[in-house]
Amino acid sequence: QVQLVESGGGLVPAGGSLRLSCAASGSISSIDAMGWYRQAPGKQRELVARIIRGGRTNYADSVKGRFTISRDNAKNTVYLQMNSLKPEDTAVYYCNADLIIGYKGGNYWGQGTQVTISS
């Protein structure tokens, strides 16, 4: 059984920083991509950042220059370093991964971690 376990959320003032982590566990053969999405109250879930095999990244325009996604392949872990946080970054942040289990691919979600930025 595959699990994505997030950590690192919390409450910080505007201008502060947080680092989110997401560790994938289970009978994983390989990981094609990992990323972070967020969902604010009353809004749709949106892509924040994504990193694919080989290290190529893409970011939402709203976080470019402030957030950095990285990945530790040996630990099956993805990180999201968030700097210069703004109140509009407040949301539940979800880890997402495209995993290969045996020879079958699948898309998986974590349970979410709350990020709250105070003004």
Image: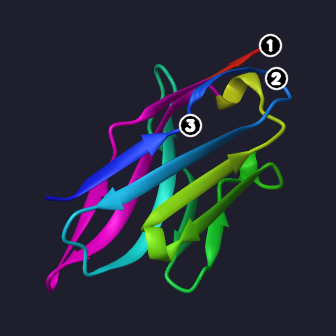
Q: Which residue is mark 3?
A: 8
Quarter of image, res 105:
bottom left
Q: Is residue 100 magenta?
A: yes
Amino acid type, mark 2: Ala
Q: Which residue is mark 1?
A: 119
Q: Main secondary structure of the magenta part?
A: strand
Q: Residue at x 78, y 33 (%)?
A: 85
Q: Label 2 to label 1, Cα distance in Å?
A: 5 Å
The image shows residue 63 at horizontal and vertical percentages of: 73, 48
Tag 2, which secondary structure?
loop
The image shows residue 73 at horizontal and vertical percentages of: 49, 76
The image shows residue 39 at horizontal and vertical percentages of: 48, 33
The reply to whether discs 2 and 1 touch (Cβ–Cβ < 8 Å) is: yes
Q: Which residue is mark 2?
A: 14
Specify start and end residues of the magenta stretch as a single range.
90-115
Q: Residue at x 77, y 28 (%)?
A: 86
Q: Residue at x 27, y 63 (%)?
A: 107
Q: Earlier in the sequence, mark 1 or mark 3?
A: 3
- Of tags 2 and 3, which is closer to the observer? 3
Amino acid type, mark 1: Ser
Tag 3, which secondary structure?
loop
The quadrant of the rendering that contains the C terminus is top right
Q: Is residue 27 magenta?
A: no
Q: Earlier in the sequence, mark 2 or mark 3?
A: 3
Q: Residue furthest top?
A: 119
Tag 1, which secondary structure?
loop
Q: Residue furthest front?
A: 74
The image shows residue 114 at horizontal and vertical percentages of: 50, 26
Q: Is residue 22 left or right of residue 108?
A: right
